[in-house]
Amino acid sequence: MTIGQDTKSLTPYPKVRRMRFRFGQPEPMTHQFVRDDIPLTHLIAVLSGAFPPGEESFIRSVRKFSGGITDPVLKKRVAGFIGQEAVHGQQHRVLNDQLIEMGFPIVRIFTFEPGALRERALVRIENLVPRHAHLAFTALAEHYTATLAARVLGEEAIQTIPGDPEVWNLLNWHAFEELEHKSVAFDVYRATGGSEALRIGLMAGSYALTIPVVGLGVAVSILSDPRSWRPIKVARQSVRLVRGPIVKGLLKEMRPYMRPGFHPDDIDTTELLERWRAELFGAQGELVDRIG
């Protein structure tokens, strides 16, 4: 079978946009760049720190199969996926440099140059697992980010959270492109014979670990930042975060992925994509001047 023949994606080709965000301009970023919200500030810092190495890993997982892709549609979609993920990592590194200077030590853990010892160790670990397991993890991670992206772009309560404008520009752009390429890794996995049992099993394990792992990361980030040592305030704001539009019900929205026969395009985000494409990159788009 030609790789890509049995895919059913409805999303367009992912378009690679060479973005150039200007963090700290014209006004310097404040330490709590999500205004007066310590846990959410640290949650975004942790996620931003983890994105560059994570996205490089996702690219490697897809490239392991790219040599066998002959279907022109899937081949073009894979090229777009790789290009978008590479730019995501590049721009989050720019933000991460700012975050390290501002006093977020946990971000430094994820920050290393290409070819550095930590990256080589990560690649060795990846090569110890079967190729399809690595790709299945990428597909489930893409489902996580696409589900969160749909919330970020679709919930007015999230869009109106006060914070640093350029950080929100980065997050909106990243969320938009995650929806553009949400099914690419999944389609490569399915077209190359990846099993439903492995796909569903890995998601089930990740599903159980999501809240503990992310919660631990945020807690460590807060503890490593003396300016955030305000236990009562942090506890109150953490409850608000868990009960708010970013987190509440998020895991429930992940569950369809564990249904046999599921495809990411079963969740239609076409209208959301079209609205935000115009808002971000239309003639008067908010981010047109950020394209390098």
Image: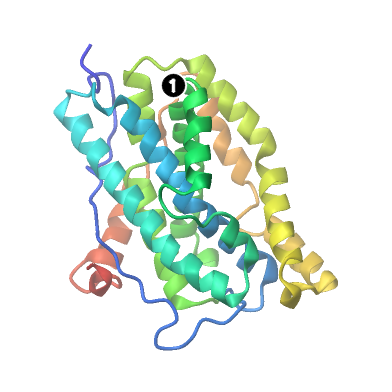
Q: Visible in this render: residue 42?
A: yes
**Residue 192 vs residue 232, the one in the foreground:** 192
Q: Is residue 273 left or right of residue 120?
A: left
Residue 5 appears in which quarter of the rendering? top left
- Residue extending farthest to the left is 72
Q: How many marks?
A: 1
Q: The residue tagged with tag 1: helix, strand or loop?
A: helix
Give how far across and how far down residue 90 sits, in percent.
Answer: 37, 59
What residue sits 55% from the left and 75% below the top?
101
Give how far across and how far down residue 146 sits, in percent.
Answer: 45, 45
Q: Is residue 66 above or below residue 254?
A: above
**Residue 76 vs residue 114, the one in the foreground:** 114
Q: Is residue 10 left or right of residue 130?
A: left
Give how far across and how far down residue 45 sits, in percent.
Answer: 57, 63
What residue sits 45% from the left and 81% below the top?
24
What residue sits 40% from the left and 50% below the top?
114
Quadrant that contains the C terminus:
bottom left
Q: Visible in this render: residue 265?
A: no
Give how far across and how far down residue 283 sits, in percent.
Answer: 18, 70
Q: Callout 1: few (<14), some (14-19), or many (20+) C-alpha neighbours within 10 Å?
A: many
Quadrant that contains the N terminus:
top left
- Residue extending farthest to the right is 232
Q: Which residue is mark 1?
A: 132
- Residue extending farthest to the bottom is 27
What residue sits 63% from the left and 35% below the top?
207
Residue 43 appears in which quarter of the rendering? bottom right
Q: Is residue 37 above or below residue 271?
A: below
Residue 234 appears in which quarter of the rendering? bottom right
Q: Amino acid at mark 1?
A: His
